[in-house]
């Protein structure tokens, strides 16, 4: 049986049997006993994420040996520089995708 045929059969079945079955308040009582989900502190996760990005960035800016780094970059070939740039771009895109998937799932 194909999926379309099954869908049509199910739609026809549920269209015919649309009467409501009374549960004598069971559903409302059950929902009343389910504990409420705790309120999420969205700002806390954003603050931790921001601090996790800003603190290492500031440490790198303050502690990096910039003169040696500049000399090493000038000595590199164009192919190596493109490889480093491509790796950085992949890392940025992967981070954006991870954030997007987290926002969709949560």
Image: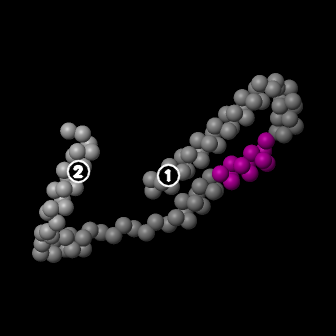
Q: Is residue 60 above or below residue 87?
A: below
Q: Residue at x 83, y 29 (%)?
A: 72
Q: Is residue 101 left or right of residue 1?
A: right
> How would you rate the neighbour count of disc 2 (Cα within 10 Å): few for under 14, some for 14-19, many for 20 or more?
few
Mark positioned earlier in the residue sequence (2 or 1): 2
Q: Quadrant of residue 26?
A: bottom left
Residue 3 percent across, percent down from the top left:
26, 43
Residue 86 in the figure: left or right of residue 104? right
**Residue ID for mark 1:** 102
User: Quick one: label 1, few (<14), some, or many (20+) residues within 10 Å?
Assistant: few
User: Is residue 80 positioned above or below 62 on the image?
Assistant: above
Q: Is residue 54 magenta?
A: yes
Q: Quadrant of residue 67?
A: top right
Q: Is residue 61 above or below residue 69?
A: below
Where does the image place residue 77, in percent across and percent down from the top left?
Answer: 82, 24
User: Magenta stretch: residue 25 in it?
Assistant: no
Asked if one can make out residue 50 in the rendered structure from this viewpoint, the answer is yes
Q: Which residue is mark 2?
A: 8
Q: Quadrant of the N terminus?
A: top left
Q: Is residue 39 above or below residue 9?
A: below
Residue drawn at the location 56% of the way across and 65% of the way down? 43
Left or right relative to 68: residue 56: left
2 vs 1, front mark:
2
Residue 86 coordinates in the image, percent (x, y)? 69, 33
Q: Quadrant of the C terminus?
A: bottom left
Q: Which mark is residue 36?
A: none
Using the numbered discs, state the Cα–Cα distance from disc 2 to disc 1 in whole angstroms.
36 Å
Q: How is the image coloured?
A: one colour
Q: What type of secondary structure mainly makes up the magenta span?
A: helix
Residue at image location 52% in from the left, 64% down from the top? 42
């Amino acid at each position: 049986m194909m999926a379309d045929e099954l869908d049509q059969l199910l739609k026809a079945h549920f269209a015919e049997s649309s009467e409501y079955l009374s549960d004598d308040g069971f559903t409302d009582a059950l929902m009343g006993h389910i504990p409420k989900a705790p309120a999420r502190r969205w700002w806390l996760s954003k603050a931790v994420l921001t601090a996790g990005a800003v603190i290492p960035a500031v440490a790198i800016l303050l502690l990096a040996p910039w003169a040696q780094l500049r000399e090493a970059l000038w000595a590199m070939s164009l192919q190596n520089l493109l490889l480093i740039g491509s790796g950085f771009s992949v890392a940025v895109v992967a981070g954006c995708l991870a954030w997007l998937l987290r926002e969709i799932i949560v």
